[in-house]
Amino acid sequence: MTEPFASIRKEFPFLLRQIDGHPIIYLDNAATSPKLQCVIDAVTGVYRNYTSNVHRGVHTLADEVTEAYEDARREIASFINASPSEIVFTRNSTEGINLVASGLGLRPDDEVVLTPAEHNSNYLPWNSRAKTVAVGMAEDGLPLYDEVEKFISPHTKLLTLAHVSNTTGIIAPVERWVEAAHRRGLPVLIDAAQSVSHVPLDVRALDCDYLVFSGHKILGPSGIGVLYGKRERLAALPLYQTGGGMVRYTAEDRFEVQDVPQRFEAGTPNIEGAIGLGAAVGWLRHLGMDKVMAHSKALGRHLVEGLCSIPGARVLACSAPLERRIGLATFSLDAPGFSPESIARLLCDRYQILVSGGYHCAHVLHDRLGLEGTVRISAHVFTTHEEIDRTLAALREIVG
Ligand SMILES: Cc1ncc(COP(=O)(O)O)c(C=O)c1O
């Protein structure tokens, strides 16, 4: 197997971590990803060089840090083919979804169409305000994406779905959802928390109305995320939070708000997070997202073919074409005594292989499948085929 990105591993200091004196194999990237050295440098550079706020100070360092913060916004905008004014910095994907959900004036009888495979962060913000209507699901957990039209009603206010499910690893046909929604004048929110690291994103081509992702899953810092919104969609949303930074002027009886995106960035933002995320995104852009996706798909194919050959393993969404899968697969084992948590623990304790075991915040999907959790193996750009082989060999040894 070719290892197209083996040489980049040295750019991740975390990959030198050991457990019990042994090197680790990190395959829990869907939970969170290691940080690049250039991200660590960008973040520490902010602490070292700029003790200053953005958009507020009147001195050289304030100018410099504001420029760096806005450069990061420009870099991120260009990464997803948006305009910088359409990029709102949030804390994470969850906050971006809540910002939109809280601004749409949803009522209990309104409906939001989604899939049963959504992460809780793209389920609860809707479910707590309106009715969620999930499309059907195949026996292996693959959402029946193509049936979306059947679930749109006169009560529907929005369609939303994960571009890549954090549980199945399948790339959803989001274009089809956007088309179905726009035919009826409805907006679509894409949860790109998982896809952003594996699939090239072009919000203009997708024509989605909103899109969210988190810095920590794309080799960047925690505590920073992005909400993309078409300019007119963002401008139509009511204020989310109020405070410093989002107003031009405040008098005792009135205040004048900034334009988007600043109007949604009340208070001192996560300056170092935004600048660190800009560095991560710039690094990936340089590497080339088409190549990143090809590697991710090759890892996904390798992983699923290997898992399917393990006796008793039930791989979620295995009916989906392999070319629609990123380097992520989730499975359960029909073998007594092997809970998902115990398998994850064994992989760590015996083999220093780090994966997830549990519900992956996709309770609805697991509930529908009658599963008390699954094991998730999730790769990133630095993952090698050799690591996948070693993980499969460890699993074979565990099941005997
Ligand atoms: C598909 C998906 N959506 C949303 C989220 C929430 O991301 P965050 O916790 O960074 O807000 C996750 C996190 O795992 C995810 O995988």
Image (spheres, helix red, strand yellow):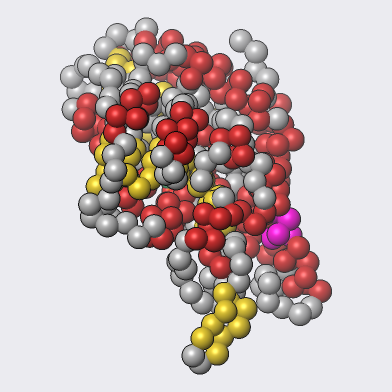
Q: Residue at x 70, y 36 (%)?
A: 285
Locate the N terminus and report the quarter of the image it occupies.
top right
Q: How many marks?
A: 0
Q: What residue is drawn where x is 56% and y is 55%? A: 232
Residue 333 screen position, x and y as percent: 27, 19
Residue sitting at x 67%, y 54%: 84
Report the image quarter containing ligand 1.
top left
Along the line of sight, the residue nearer the viewer: 77 or 394: 77
Q: Residue at x 47, y 54 (%)?
A: 96
Residue range of the region highlighted in magenta in the rendering: 68-72
Q: Residue furthest bottom?
A: 252
Task: Tell me the quadrant of the picture where the C terminus can be found.
Answer: top left
Which one is nearer the viewer's eye here, 327 or 127?
127
Q: Position of residue 345 (x, y in %)?
A: 34, 32
Q: Looking at the image, is 158 positioned above or below residue 316?
A: below
- Main secondary structure type of the part rendered in magenta: helix
Estimate the x, y position of residue 43 in percent, counting from the top left: 66, 56
Q: Is residue 241 above or below residue 86?
A: below
